[in-house]
Amino acid sequence: MSELGFTSPREMAAALFIIGGLIFFIGSGIGMLRLPDFYSRIHASGNSETLGCMLTFIGLMIYEGATLTSLKIAFVFLLVFMANPIGSHILSKSAYKSGHPIWTLKTKGAKKLLGLAGPDHSIDEPVGHLEKEEK
């Protein structure tokens, strides 16, 4: 373990949790850049950032051990864990009430984005549904 720079299994466990949190933060950033509309982006960022914070804070608490600093980190974690989903919900609800457009297949460029630009797909067809079997 000393070859990797870790002096104890506790440091290794803390690093794994922090790296896991970093992966979720990167996924959140990619979702913010790649998803087509506001509601999809707020969903991706709200969920993955909350999980990323949770893993990062757990890693920091493991690294610090049972100290007052860990208690402070746990308190901040609880605040973030409660505030992030509530904030995401409030943002999306206010956007919906103010008439912010919802992304559908009828949205300009939607079929091209999904790779459904061919004549086989109808604009009114739901995304991801299988065709109904004939009886």
Image (cartoon, helix red, strand yellow):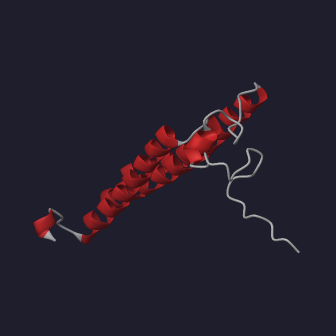
Q: For this rendering, which residue is in front, 42 or 73?
A: 42
**Residue 89 in the image: above or below residue 122:** above
**Residue 14 in the image: above or below residue 108:** below
Evaluate whether residue 46 shows in this view: no
**Image point 72% across, 64% down: which residue?**
130
Furthest residue to the top? 98
Number of marks in the rendered image: 0
Q: For this rendering, which residue is in front, 48 or 16?
A: 48
Q: Position of residue 127 (x, y in %)?
A: 69, 53
Q: Quadrant of the C terminus?
A: bottom right
**Image point 35% across, 61% down: which residue?**
62
Q: Is residue 8 left or right of residue 25?
A: left
**Image point 38% across, 57% down: which residue?**
61
Q: For this rendering, which residue is in front, 59 or 46?
A: 46
Q: Position of residue 33 (x, y in %)?
A: 47, 38
Evaluate whether residue 94 shows in this view: yes
**Image point 50% across, 47% down: which residue?**
49
